Amino acid sequence: MHGLSRKARAVLRRDRRKKQVGELNLVPMIDILVVLVFFLLVNSTGVSILGINLPDENKKVEPDPNRKPLIVTVRSDSLLLTEGGSELGRFGSASEGYDFKALSERLLTIKDARPEETSITLLVEPETTHDSLVQTMDAVRITPADGGRTLRTLFPNIALGDAPPSTAAAGASP
């Protein structure tokens, strides 16, 4: 450094100061974020959005003989509401659009008669769209009350199952 001019020494000092400040290394931060995202995805399987309780396949539940279960069967031709095997109503069709409002109104009259009841079963055909299933779940869970400003809880405990073959389809098969 003794043989360098004053300007050259000043440039070297400036370069040394810049190296001491350092740069922000983003690679370790990105690695941590990738691991964090993977961890969150793996551990999010137990997250419940609507609080739907799916049955445990090993658990046997004894049915109450006095209780008549409410069942909404989502078919391609209509929504079918039954109670203990007797039909309470049919609402719309998939081609024309299901009548979710009429279903909610009918369930509201049932809820008024039995306010302690909180359970309902949805039986769904395999061809049912996801959108139809979600709209049906919303229709049986809550309904607008007082001019649509507030929501009234109908049947929040929803059980899902496969719909049995329709009688029309069973009669048509060989």
Image (spheres, rainbow, N blue to C red):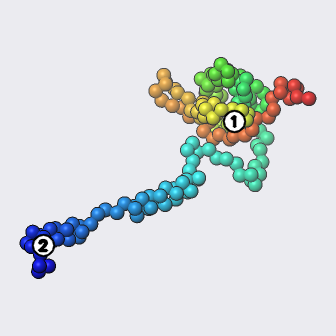
Q: Which mark is residue 12?
A: none
Q: Which mark is residue 122?
A: 1
The amino acid type of the residue labelled 1 equals Leu
Q: Residue furthest left?
A: 6
Mark 2 element type: helix
Pinpoint residue 62: horizontal percent, then vertical percent. Answer: 77, 48
Tell me, yes or no, if residue 132 can be seen here.
Answer: yes
Pinpoint residue 41: horizontal percent, then vertical percent. Answer: 54, 54
Quadrant location of residue 107?
A: top right
Residue at 56%, 50% (x, y): give it: 47
Residue at 20%, 71% (x, y): give it: 16
Query: Which of these two is toward me, 17 or 65?
Result: 17
Would residue 65 be found to the left or right of residue 35 on screen? right
How crowded is the residue under tag 1: few (<14 C-alpha within 10 Å), some, or many (20+)? many
Residue at 48%, 29% (x, y): give it: 150
Where the C terminus falls, by quadrant?
top right
Q: Which mark is residue 9?
A: 2
Quadrant location of residue 102?
A: top right
What is the C-alpha distance between the residues marked 1 and 2? 82 Å
> Relative to 158, is 30 above or below?
below
